[in-house]
Image (cartoon, coloured by chain):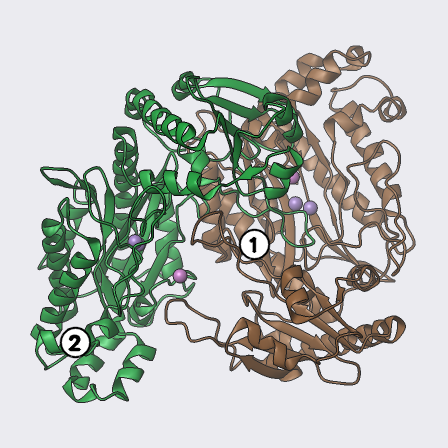
Chain colours: A brown, B green
Amino acid sequence: MTATADLWPLFPDHIKQLQTRAERLCKRENLDLLAIHSGQQKRWFLDDMNYPFRANPHFKAWCPETQLPNAWVIIKPDTRPTLVLLNAPDFWHTTANLESEPWLEEFHVEHISSPEAIEKLLPYDKKNAAYLGEHIEVAKALGFENINPDPVLHFFHYHRLFKTDYEIACLAQANHIAAEGHIAAAEAFFKGDSEFDCLLNYMAATRQGQNEVPYNHIIGQNKNASVLHHWLPDKKSQVSLKSMLVDAGAEVCGYAADISRTWSAEHNEYEELIAALDQITLALIDKMKPGMEFPVLHQLAHEQIANVLFAFGFVSCSPEQMIEDGITSVFFPHGLGHPLGLQVHDVGAAQADERGTPIPSPTGHLTLKTTRTVEPRQVYTIEPGIYFIEPLLQKLASSRNKHVINWKRVDEFRPFGGVRIEDNIVIYRERNDNLTRQTSLDAYVKKVTRLA
Amino acid sequence: MTATADLWPLFPDHIKQLQTRAERLCKRENLDLLAIHSGQQKRWFLDDMNYPFRANPHFKAWCPETQLPNAWVIIKPDTRPTLVLLNAPDFWHTTANLESEPWLEEFHVEHISSPEAIEKLLPYDKKNAAYLGEHIEVAKALGFENINPDPVLHFFHYHRLFKTDYEIACLAQANHIAAEGHIAAAEAFFKGDSEFDCLLNYMAATRQGQNEVPYNHIIGQNKNASVLHHWLPDKKSQVSLKSMLVDAGAEVCGYAADISRTWSAEHNEYEELIAALDQITLALIDKMKPGMEFPVLHQLAHEQIANVLFAFGFVSCSPEQMIEDGITSVFFPHGLGHPLGLQVHDVGAAQADERGTPIPSPTGHLTLKTTRTVEPRQVYTIEPGIYFIEPLLQKLASSRNKHVINWKRVDEFRPFGGVRIEDNIVIYRERNDNLTRQTSLDAYVKKVTRLA
Ligand SMILES: [Mn+2]
Ligand SMILES: [Mn+2]
Ligand SMILES: [Mn+2]
Ligand SMILES: [Mn+2]
Ligand code: NI
Ligand code: NI
């Protein structure tokens, strides 16, 4: 769960807002009960071991403790939400002890002694009840007819992007924790540690294990920094350590931080490239404001990256030409960012309204999954990157654009892999809050690099 | 994969034995093709993140590289086995590069560019073909009628217990790696580190992350040592650190080590209890031999544990009476051991023959999952334990047996949690090989404890 006490004064209002939201939905959809299932442990095939438990994000919205298989949140209009906890006798495993948790006060708490016992806490007639969860067979066995109805999912997914104060505080805390991890990983990097040892240092600082974070730690050194999701850290140290890209987060009460930083072993031109991308990140964040469509910001990022590609001498044609010919997409093939919250890629990212009307990605930018219009109380990542990705460079080298590339210059940077800088931003009407720059990370970057 | 070069000379014979085994099955079941599917990535509910990949154990039996989703092993009588690898263009992720692997020579290798492309490598008529894997919908879409047929699973599960030289070498290497982890965790313990920091030290020494091991690391300090599967390590250091139970393994080419050691912060009576249990472990291993039914060994363990409970003054009645009244089961509630191999609790553990005839657990010992008769080339864990488990002690305290318990003595040991010692043993006709005692662990135990 990893939370500090200052979150809890914000929790009652969070639940109140969720309850109000849910009541509006129930009225619209003629529902009188929502049964939100945390989930069940999943077994490995033909084994008695389980996958790490990952709770239903709809459950996580209500319940700060995410390691509770077979738990339920039951919502009824004009009624305090019920939290149902499984209290099965089990001396084999460590079970979460929630008794003294202050947030429990917002719930009517029920205990069941077996997963099936949820049945007696549900109405016999489930015509106006809906099940929200992964286990269709459980829902059917319980007699639900409405299982994950589209209108219900769309509604919550759309509104999920608008964060309560509690949610923003969770995201801010997650940023503080992740920042400690990034600093620890960088310290290990400067000592010459392997990717795996940098990961261990990250975990030591964040106090969160590999299955307690919202996404797999990405730690890539040298050429591995060009693998966008480099999820299997090398165990061996690099012979000549040049660079490290760390994209890693932390979780607080189910809310994710998603931060990227890139490090150079020396004060060189690669470090200047990192600094240039850092400037782009801040400039783009500065441009973000309510009413702006995220794809417009993505387009702006391509312009800025084109400028850097020109300034560093990688590409010799004009920035406009670079974008038109798709050259920026070779160096920056992913989306500029995404909504952040209960899921690292928060859902509802391409939904125009609470009924789920899709907003398609702009032509030529299918990797941009976020097409919403930026609004107050939303939280986004901004994560531009410049990479030297072998398969994409090879394709470029055999394309009609090959002559505008300064291949000698590109070759100089290939061993460094790439650069990504990623911050987490809260949008307000009058300002943006950069949660990532409010941590100790910025001061550390300034200390160790020449140019940031 | 984590393997050293000395494994590969043993690999051809391993594949030859598996092929011979499979051919006998195919003849018996009138099959001319077995399609063994490694598996697919599994998504978190409503998310774009995946659970850690865990390969189908039937695939792991043939293929040393276990991180290969959408791969296949195709077996036909009188034909070299085919290994089908997915080579989809993907610059987002790190993919295993197998090209230079010496074990690849035992296979005819085919590449597919999409998961669906497996279809063209399979016969159109699948009447005499069987699918072995988790993804029933994939098998059906491909036109398989025989999906995980019971006779096929029972056959492989039964024979799985008999290890080839290659498999034994993998298990031995896994023991060496795990031993380094146990020593590193113990060193951290003696410095006063938290459970989580001991885990990080374990991982640093073994070079295997939390999702690269055959089961979750169990690291319990003080009272947590009484939780048999204490899978969520405490992040905070203990105020008064007394004890630590580590049950943790390592994996080599898909084969598991499963080792437990228990440590005392001081030279005290608890350390004597650890030493007593260590002696029981060795004595039981000494008694193990071909022809012995595992439940008989489990019964012997209860006798030995009864002796220790008497000698340490926890229980005042005779050892015979203790067993008859189920008192030993309060202090030792789990099974003595299990077959070890591709899965930490290897399947086929309660199968009398290759047709799957079950061998039931002895009355009163339902937690003993292994009921087979010990035979040469089998590998078992031997893992006696003595624990002070609150819920079980509470039940005992309100039972008619409460008067034979020296509760003051029990109270003295409660803060230590418990003790478990677990070794991995290969049975041969003329001797047993204790893979765990062939590592550096024994010398380390002798160095740091007074009595071992
Ligand atoms: Mn990221
Ligand atoms: Mn991101
Ligand atoms: Mn075991
Ligand atoms: Mn074990
Ligand atoms: Ni990915
Ligand atoms: Ni368990």
Query: Compared to B249, does A103 lie above or below?
Result: below
Identity of the residue drawn at 21% across and 54% down:
B294
Query: Compared to A157, does B66 lie above or below?
Result: above
How far across and down, in percent of the image, does residue B191 sit? 28, 58
How far across and down, in percent of the image, does residue B128 sit? 53, 29
How far across and down, in percent of the image, does residue B446 sit? 12, 51
Amino acid type shown at disc 2: Glu
Residue designated by label 1:
A213
Identity of the residue drawn at 46% across and 34% down:
B59
Element assignment for label 2: helix
- Residue toward you, A109 or B70: B70
Amino acid type shown at disc 1: Val
Looking at the rendered structure, the number of numbered marks drawn on it comes to 2
Query: Compared to A187, does A12 lie above or below?
Result: below
Element assignment for label 1: loop
Ligand 5 rendered quadrant: top right
Image quadrant assignment for residue B87: top right
Which quadrant would the N terminus of chain A be assigned to in this image? bottom right
Q: Chain of mark 2?
A: B
Residue that protrudes farthest toward the right in the picture? A291
Residue B324 is tagged as 2
Which quadrant would the C terminus of chain A be assigned to in this image? top right
Identity of the residue drawn at 56% across and 68% down:
A70
Residue B256 is tagged as none
